[in-house]
Image (cartoon, rainbow, N blue to C red):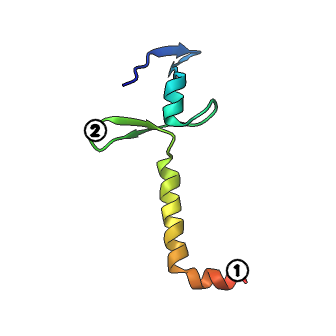
Amino acid sequence: MLTFKVTTVGASSGVILTKEAMARLKVKKGDTLYLTEAPDGGYRLTPYDPEFARQMALAEDIMHDDREVLRALAK
């Protein structure tokens, strides 16, 4: 388990990620992280954007349902 300390960053608060934490999250400086609620009531810090995943799932449904229309448009 990794632990982090909350520190002051300007007028806000922040958390400093170690190189090990950044490697585990597969992120680099400038990337966006998301704090999401977990089903167990806790929180999860992740580079995964749940809104983008929702939009992609909708797009996949549309592409599957309307594949004949999309094929015709591709010609």
- The x and y percentages for residue 21 are 49, 27
Left or right side of 71 for 23: left
Front-lying residue, 47 or 37 = 47
51 lies above or below 23: below
User: Disc 1 marks which residue?
Assistant: 74
Hey, which residue is sitting farthest left in the picture? 40
Q: Amino acid at mark 2?
A: Gly
User: Disc 2 marks which residue?
Assistant: 41
Hey, which residue is sitting farthest right in the picture? 75
How many numbered marks, from 0 up? 2
- The x and y percentages for residue 46 are 47, 38
- The residue at 70%/80% (across/down) is 74
Neighbours of disc 1 within 10 Å: few (<14), some (14-19), many (20+): few
- The residue at 49%/55% (across/down) is 53
Left or right side of 75 for 1: left
Comes first in the chain, label 1 or label 2 = 2
- The residue at 63%/29% (across/down) is 29
SS for dot 2 = loop
Neighbours of disc 2 within 10 Å: few (<14), some (14-19), many (20+): few
Per the model, the C-alpha gap separating discs 1 and 2 is 46 Å
50 lies above or below 18: below
Front-lying residue, 36 or 18 = 18
> Closer to the camera: disc 1 or disc 2?
1
- The x and y percentages for residue 64 are 51, 76
Where residue 28 sits, quadrant-wise, is top right
- State which quarter of the image contains the C terminus: bottom right
- The residue at 54%/67% (across/down) is 59
Where residue 44 sits, quadrant-wise, is top left
SS for dot 1 = helix
